[in-house]
Amino acid sequence: MDITYKRFNLELKNTFTISHGSRDFQETLVVIVSDGKYKAYGEAAATVYYGVSVDKMIASLQSVEPIVAENIHRRPEEIWELTYLHLKHNPFAQCALDIAMHDLHGKRNNLPLYKIWGLKIDEVPLTNYTIGIDTVDNMIDKIREFPWPIYKIKLGTENDIAIVEELRKHTDSVFRIDANASWTAQQAIENSKALKELNVEFLEQPLKPGDLAGMEKLYERSELPIIADESCLVEEDVEKCAPYFHGVNIKLTKCAGITPGKRMIQKARSLGLKVMVGCMTESTVSMSAIGQLLPMLDYVDMDGALLIKNDIADGVKIINGKVHFPKRNGTGAKLFNFE
């Protein structure tokens, strides 16, 4: 068994701004696991907001290499459990490893992951394309340059409704609004009324995660469905979200990989919640992993690779919102210039 770590600096097509800040580049880690016959790939992006660096991820993963080597023949879910206590404080690192182990599992079984799970890809949700906070003119230009059936619009300004009203003049596509926890409950209630008339599908995490009283009030009075993001990071959060949200957005990096992500999907379904899987700014390595989950989802946000100039891998391709799957096993991802 061999584990290799490769860091990449992904260059964004446009400066990406949300209520937390702006960036032009995104550092990411690709974990390459080889069992001597197959090479498998996993990825997790570094993020200052969550205190995650590539160096920290590599150090964490190096600490579990003996466990992985000894158990390389086991299923990915078993390896996740065996490494959890060592990696529980670094879910991004565990996510990268878990994706690689799932990729390896699929390759060993000569099947894409979705087929191993008994899923079909005949009808899967379209992915949105994200428009970050910018001047209205620049946001309009991005819509014109990238026609798409569904846009996720990042908000958190003093003129949010006016921005959406202006964008609506230039496209009939569905809007999803992500305020990144920047509104108050009363703002969200009032905004939901206006946004419903502007063909907005749902509001994602409008309030701060700790504002339970506000979330309860919003849940009762919102004109639009509310989807949890920052309020739903790990498995135990799904049940906590049920009284306050209509659905949850699961991020594989935040919950520590495909293994817990699938459990979160099942739990959300059992509670009657809508299910979305989202992404960070990541390459096609991560997008190909998310793609395997598509038949389980109501919504998906897997535009990470569409937002960067220098994608590092081949795998799932997204054309006009629709995901196209490669004829390869595992996640279907293949790192450029590596094999």
Image (cartoon, helix red, strand yellow):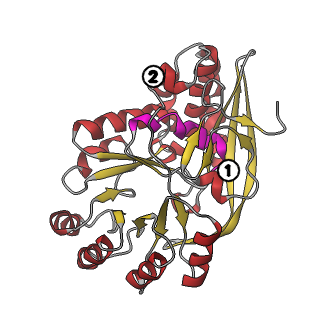
Q: Main secondary structure of the magenta part?
A: helix
Q: Position of residue 288 (x, y in %)?
A: 60, 38
- Residue at image mark 2: 117
Residue 22: quarter of image:
bottom right
Seen in the picture, residue 80 relative to 203 is either above or below; the reply is above
Count numbered badges in the picture: 2
Q: Nearer the viewer, mark 1 or mark 2?
A: 2
Q: Nearer the viewer, residue 119 or 149?
A: 149
Amino acid at the residue labelled 2: Trp
Look at the image and say whether residue 57 sits in the magenta stretch. no
Q: Nearer the viewer, residue 24 or 314?
A: 314
Look at the image and say whether residue 290 sits in the magenta stretch. yes
- Residue at image mark 1: 28
Q: Position of residue 225 (x, y in %)?
A: 27, 60
Residue 295's tag is: none
Query: For the point 61% across and 49% down, which residue is it?
Result: 319
Query: For the point 65% across and 40% down, which residue is it?
Result: 285
Amino acid at the residue labelled 1: Thr
Q: Is residue 205 visible?
A: no
Give left or right: position of 252 versus 211.
right
Quadrant including the C terminus: top right
Q: Is residue 154 visible?
A: yes
Q: Mark 2: which secondary structure? A: loop
Q: Which range is magenta?
A: 282-296
Task: Specify few, some or many for label 1: CA neighbours under 10 Å numbering under 14, 14-19, or 20 or more.
Answer: many
Q: Which label's residue is closer to the chain start, 1 or 2?
A: 1
Q: Mark 1: which secondary structure? A: strand
Query: For the point 45% across and 82% down, which residue is it?
Result: 163
